[in-house]
Amino acid sequence: MKSELYKQYKDEVVPVLKEKFGYQNVMQVPRIEKVVLNVGYGRHTKDSAYIENVGNTLRVITGQAPVHNKAKKSISNFKVREGSPVGVSVTLRGEKMYDFLQKLVSITFPRVRDFRGIDPNSFDKQGNYAVGFKENVAFPEISVGSLDKVHGLEVIIRTTAIKKEEGLELLKGLGFPFKQK
C-alpha cells in the first residue's frame, strides 16, 4: 500500500513539474531520495543517559533504530577525539520516508510553537532541504510528561533536483508550508 503523499506526488506533482520545467521524460522530474534525521550530542558526549534518551526519541519518532556516529578526526578546540561519539542519525527511504513526511507536513509543523512557515532559503545548490527543530516536543509520538531532557534535531530532505528552484517547487507541490516572501 502506497502512502498518500506518494500518490499525490505521482498524480499531481509530476505533471505540474514536467510542464513547468519542460522535462521530456518522467524520470527527469525531481523526486525525494531519502530523509535523514540528525541529533548532535554537543556538550553531553559523556552523559550516557542523555545519549540513550536521544536514541530512544529518534527510535520512537521514526520507527527505526538510530545509528550512533563517531568523530572522523580529532579537533582539539572542540575537545573531540577521533572515534568518540558525536551524534546519532536515522535515514528513511521508501514508504517509511513518505509516511514520515506526511506526518511532518500535516501534524508536526502545526505543533511547532509560533510557526509561521518554513524558510525557503534553506535549500542548498542541489535542491536538498534542511530544517531544524529546537525542541523534539513538536512530534506527536513524544509526550511532554515522559521527557527527561528536551533536545533539538535536524531533518534533511535529499532530492534528485539539480537546482534550488526545482527542489522548492517539488516540496511546495507536496504541501510543505513555506513562508511567503
Image (spheres, rainbow, N blue to C red):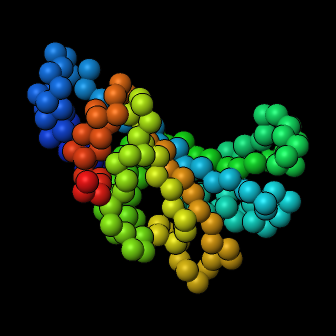
**Where residue 71 sits: x, y (%)?**
78, 40
180 left or right of 88 in image? left
Residue drawn at the location 40% of the way across and 65% of the way down: 108
Quarter of the figure that contains the N terminus: top left
71 left or right of 29 in image? right
Image: 96 above or below 45:
above
**Where residue 21 sits: x, y (%)?**
18, 26
173 left or right of 84 in image? left
The reply to whether residue 109 is in sight is yes
The reply to whether residue 83 is in sight is no
Residue at the farthest front position: 181
Q: Nearer the viewer, residue 100 or 126?
A: 126
Q: How many marks?
A: 0
**Where residue 155 sits: x, y (%)?**
50, 50
Residue drawn at the location 13% of the way across and 35% of the way down: 16
Residue drawn at the location 25% of the way across and 54% of the way down: 181
Residue 22 in which image quadrant: top left
Residue at the farthest bottom position: 145
Image: 40 above or below 93:
below
**Where residue 121 sits: x, y (%)?**
38, 46
Residue at the farthest top position: 24
Residue 50 in which image quadrant: bottom right
Residue drawn at the location 37% of the way across and 69% of the way down: 115
105 left or right of 20 in image? right
